[in-house]
Image (cartoon, coloured by chain):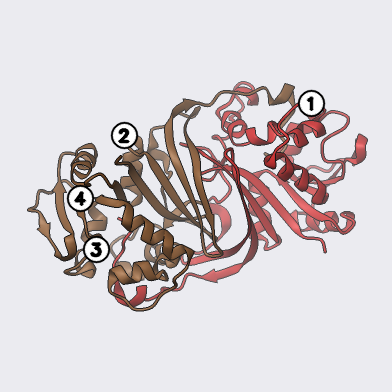
Chain colours: A red, B brown
């Protein structure tokens, strides 16, 4: 059965990129990209990713297996406009997706057909519509929300995400873009409960996969009968 | 050899408590405590914690073993003033630490001796001094930075932390206090590199232990020869 999945490489503090590039200079030289490149280094080094990009070499290891599994599970993608724009040139004639990609945007545009099975369809009536179109195109495989973080957040907010995999990279960053930012529309005493379904640990990254549950109120427990805080202050 | 360690229970977005309690009403009824209680629920349910608090029952499981191991490894504690104040009454005559605790504060106060081996010594000349005094008192065991988050951050900033264990609880929160907040004094293109040394996965929480390395510049890699972003947008 088709699941809607998302995955993101993040620092231990939850950053998936540095502070957003302002437009001065090239993105590649920005603090945004410097942090993004650090947390996605394990992907770049994976042979499974390099093969899709047409690059030689790379590590044939557990991390590469995780990448290969992700590519293999996706029957269609949903993508943010900024990522689609940024990738259009570098991905070239044979983008790594090899499946239909539905781009959430405000600007109508004709579907772009690329080699290797990749197409980009521009969806202007919202995230839910893009997910629905991707589901219809996925041929029973999963719909992968490819990013970026703000799109993943929108899909979570809309209650449409079934599974989230965080690739937690052992690095502390001081600032940047976070997946779980303030605009999730959660009340102060409200949470979204997850269930971990798989953890894979490697020296470069800890892969944690979650089933996404519903929203739930944060209910006060009795601390076992009134004990004080032991880890906060 | 004595290590300086810290551990914190956090949500998948890195929150260890809700937004800081303003002082209106009781802390126990605040959004800060509601989120804190959610991310520390696995501790409250652990028999090893309950025994230290003098409470009956609890789970005798892997999570309880993690709690027991933490208590057993600590020869002395360093604690923030707010946590020490908040705990003073509920911890009672026999606090759960059973070791010397060094409280970082601006207010001089005579050492408080409690039962079971716990003492509270108030250190007014800074975090480094508190860590040093705890090291001398630890009898070869570890110095545990007990929290809260801002104290852990200060110890990291000062380059004094050897090991960090994050207990990542499968819940998404919308707002609150984060360990890795903006005042780490990291440059936009700078990071603190960690090395994962142990991962323990349970349904309630993923325990990830890191060795804390030094600060390092975020160096641009070549993306394998100029591929575009594949997970950001």
The residue positioned 42% from the left and 62% from the top of the image is B65
Alpha-carbon span between mark 3 and mark 1: 57 Å
Q: Quadrant of the C terminus of chain B?
A: top right
| Chain of the residue on which disc 4 is drawn | B
Q: Is residue B25 visible?
A: no
Q: Are marks 2 and 3 on the same chain?
A: yes
As drawn, the label of residue B121 is none
| Chain of the residue on which disc 3 is drawn | B
Kindly state the secondary structure of the residue where label 1 is placed.
Answer: loop
Using a 10 Å C-alpha cutoff, classify the residue at mark 2 as few (fewer than 14 neighbours), some (14 to 19) or many (20 or more).
Answer: few
Q: Which residue is mark 2?
A: B158
Alpha-carbon span between mark 1 and mark 4: 54 Å
Residue A19 versus residue B84 in the image, above or below: above
The residue positioned 46% from the left and 67% from the top of the image is A189
Q: Percent x, y for residue B157? A: 35, 36
Using a 10 Å C-alpha cutoff, classify the residue at mark 1 as few (fewer than 14 neighbours), some (14 to 19) or many (20 or more).
Answer: some
Using a 10 Å C-alpha cutoff, classify the residue at mark 3 as few (fewer than 14 neighbours), some (14 to 19) or many (20 or more).
Answer: some
Q: Is residue B59 visible?
A: yes
Q: Percent x, y for residue B80? A: 26, 51
Q: Which residue is mark 1?
A: A55
Alpha-carbon span between mark 2 and mark 1: 41 Å
């Amino acid at each position: 059965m088709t699941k809607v999945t998302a995955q993101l490489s993040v620092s231990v503090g939850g950053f998936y990129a540095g502070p957003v590039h302002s437009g001065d200079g090239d993105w590649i030289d920005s603090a945004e990209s410097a942090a993004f490149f650090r947390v996605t280094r394990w992907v770049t080094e994976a042979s499974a990713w390099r093969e899709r990009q047409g690059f030689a070499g790379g590590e044939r290891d557990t991390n590469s297996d995780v990448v290969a599994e992700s590519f293999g599970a996706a029957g269609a993608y949903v993508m943010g406009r900024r990522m689609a724009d940024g990738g259009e040139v570098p991905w070239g004639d044979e983008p790594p997706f090899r499946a239909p990609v539905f781009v959430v945007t405000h600007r109508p545009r004709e579907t772009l057909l690329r080699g290797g099975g990749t197409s980009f369809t521009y969806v202007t009536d919202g995230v839910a519509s893009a997910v629905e179109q991707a589901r219809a195109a996925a041929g029973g495989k999963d719909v992968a929300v490819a990013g970026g973080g703000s799109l993943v957040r929108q899909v979570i907010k809309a209650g449409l995400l079934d599974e989230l995999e965080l690739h937690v990279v052992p690095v502390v960053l001081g600032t940047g873009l976070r997946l779980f930012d303030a605009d999730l529309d959660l009340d102060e005493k409200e949470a979204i409960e997850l269930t971990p379904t798989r953890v894979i640990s490697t020296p470069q990254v800890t892969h944690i996969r979650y089933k996404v549950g519903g929203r739930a109120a944060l209910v006060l427990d009795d601390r076992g009968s009134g004990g004080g805080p032991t880890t906060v202050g």
